[in-house]
Image (cartoon, rainbow, N blue to C red):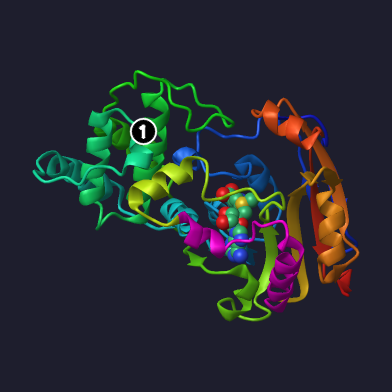
Amino acid sequence: MHESETDNTQVTTSMRRVTLRRFEKVNNPRSIHGIYPYRGKMSPLDASHVIEQLPTKSRLLDPFCGTGTIIYEAQKHGLKSIGVDNNPLACTIARGKTDPLDKKSTIEHLENAIEAAKSLTDVTPMPSQPARNFHEKTADQIMRILSVSNDFSSYLLSSFYGAICLAARACSDWIWTSTSTGKINKPLKDIDFYSKLLRKARKHIDYVLGTPSVKIHTHDTRNIHQIVRKHSVDFVYTSPPYFDALDYTGYYSKIVLEILGVDRSIIREGLIQRYSTYKEEMTKALQSIDQVLHDESLVIFVVGNRMVRKKLIRGSDFFTEIAPWTDPYIVEREYTKTASGLWDKINITKRKEQVIVWDLASGGRK
Ligand SMILES: C[S@@+](CC[C@H](N)C(=O)[O-])C[C@H]1O[C@@H](n2cnc3c(N)ncnc32)[C@H](O)[C@@H]1O
């Protein structure tokens, strides 16, 4: 994905300013973030560029943290941070990126688990729906690892789930793109899951920092004030759930959740992703977020344009209307050449996003 606009644009408020940078590419392959292909994952380079401008002695909240891109980058820059998301799978990945761990014993644990998995005699077969994506030998290896994963750390679980996604793609000979995930390409290839998993765990582990400690809560942000202390947050930085009903339990996560035997509909119930109720639910979340802010907090939302029922809705118009804060500063950016040509077609738009900054010190509350 290439960004075509916004070169060192300054988002300025009378008190503080945040600059945004132009990037040729939004992904950083030399990072922890490739551990899992989460839907809606934001650019770590973008996150890092914004976060490095924030004072380290401050407390950052990402109320829709997903797999923790912002939280990890905040940790890297020494900020105290809290992530909240109501999708338990996303929270596991966010913890996997940020929890402290001992690298040597973590890899040893995985090596031993793989040996134990190989010698299991009684293995539960993979449920038929996800099994369609894997060669039978690969599916058997995945289920063996599942049987020995009860004591896995969040990092090892993240590696396990990420390796399932990689193996699914590899069994279909890597034909999957962001719009063809789940397409089966027969004959399915026999992929050695054990080596994929081990390679993945070894690849990302050096990026785990573990300090300063961060808190990731699996919780509904519509009631975030129940778990985050009132008036305690200096910065909110987030990309909220999209209002075109993007399914955060779909895409690769569908395969992982089906293998784990988790009912996706139960997770979806707790997420804001139905466009009929989106406005009401997001308004509730913003009001709850407001309770944890103080009078000088800075709030940064990354939102986008969406086509909903054939009507183009500009993310920043929508959010400035429902947010409880006044006088936002908005910068619009345009993306072209996205990985998903289909996405552009559906949305009949070049991929546009806006960064909205509310500075409560210079603006205020409605
Ligand atoms: C655009 S994604 C954020 C992705 C994240 N920035 C990342 O890089 O992985 C929006 C997130 O909002 C979460 N979400 C939706 N409704 C929620 C709710 N009611 N409470 C908490 N999180 C919610 C979804 O699970 C999803 O992970």
The residue range painted magenta reads 264-292
Q: Which residue is mark 1?
A: 132
Give the quarter of the image for residue 169.
top left
Mark 1 burial class by Cα count in 10 Å: few <14, some 14-19, many 20+: some
Q: Determine if the magenta segment contains residue 101.
A: no
**What residue do we see at 37% from left, 37% from top?**
163
Q: Name the quadrant of the C terminus.
A: bottom right
Q: Is residue 1 above or below residue 96?
A: above
x%, y% of residue 95?
Answer: 44, 57
Q: Would residue 184 be seen by someone viewing this image from the given angle?
A: yes
Identify the image quadrant of the N terminus. Answer: top right
Quarter of the displayed picture in which ligand 1 can be seen? bottom right
Magenta span: predominant SS is: helix
Q: Is residue 141 above or below residue 148?
A: above
- Magenta includes 285? yes
Above or below, comparing residue 110 to residue 90 in the picture:
above
Residue sitting at x 82%, y 35% = 7
- 247 relative position to 317: left or right: left
